[in-house]
Image (cartoon, grey):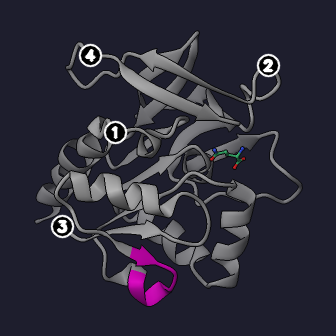
Amino acid sequence: MKVGVLALQGDVREHFAALIACGVYPTTIRRPEELALVDALVIPGGESTTISHLAKIFDLFDPIAWRIKAGMPVYGSCAGMILLADQILDATDGQESFGGLNITVRRNAFGRQVDSFESDIAFADGSNEAIRAVFIRAPWVERVGLGVEVLAEVGSHPVAVRSSTILATSFHPELTADHRIHRYFIEEVARAALQQVQ
Ligand code: GLN
């Protein structure tokens, strides 16, 4: 399986390291030709407005949106979650997302109380062990649409969700040594989806 990491802005290196720890050697994606060569994509944490702006400049915005609609497995953390959401609350003027995931997110949702925090949360992958989740000016999910499953919550707010081919987390597993979320993406989301196509 060829996995790309969108490398326009954000914590690209950290996602690289997490994927390598899961036995996948990823490639950086900065051009449409590079996107065309991968089976699955990771959209890093960073700043969603900057990533979508740069994606337009690099002629990647529409190709990414099309690939997602066509069923390419994709995982987004934090800003990546915002970029995958069909609707964004507290977006900047004219901010657009690639979309594909039937959710509404609120940007910087935790930001008004505390900008950043860490929490041990349950993640519904069948394991009883909590995940150390790092939240940095994180979004939360305000509406979960049809076909979207909630995998983790903080308070009553979903912070990890998936549809059949899309995984998104408000937090940054790439910033910890626990690679369960990346492994879940590779094995349960991406490999499962790609096997169905073959
Ligand atoms: N608040 C950022 C945004 O709107 C996301 C922060 C992050 O990725 N850590 O894109």
Label 3 – label 1 distance at C-alpha: 23 Å
For badge 2, the amino acid type reads Gln
Callout 3: SS: loop
Residue 24 versus residue 7 in the image, above or below: above
Query: In the rendered view of the protein, which quadrant contains the N terminus?
Result: bottom left
Residue 78: x %, y % from top left = 58, 43
Q: Residue furthest right?
A: 93
Callout 4: SS: loop
Residue 73 shows in the view = no
Q: Is residue 149 magenta?
A: no
Callout 2: SS: loop
Mark 4 CB near ligand 1 (8 Å cut): no
Label 3 – label 2 distance at C-alpha: 41 Å
Label 1 – label 2 distance at C-alpha: 27 Å
Q: Earlier in the sequence, mark 2 or mark 4?
A: 2
- The answer to whether the residues at label 3 and label 2 have Cβ atoms under 8 Å apart is no
Residue 113 is marked as 2
**Which residues are drawn in magenta?**
28-34
Query: In the rendered view of the protein, which quadrant contains the C terminus?
Result: bottom left
Q: Which residue does the image show at 55% across and 45% down from the upper left? A: 81
Residue 131: x %, y % from top left = 37, 23
Q: Nearer the viewer, residue 11 or 81?
A: 11
Q: Which residue does the image show at 51% across and 53% down from the upper left? A: 100
For badge 1, the amino acid type reads Ala
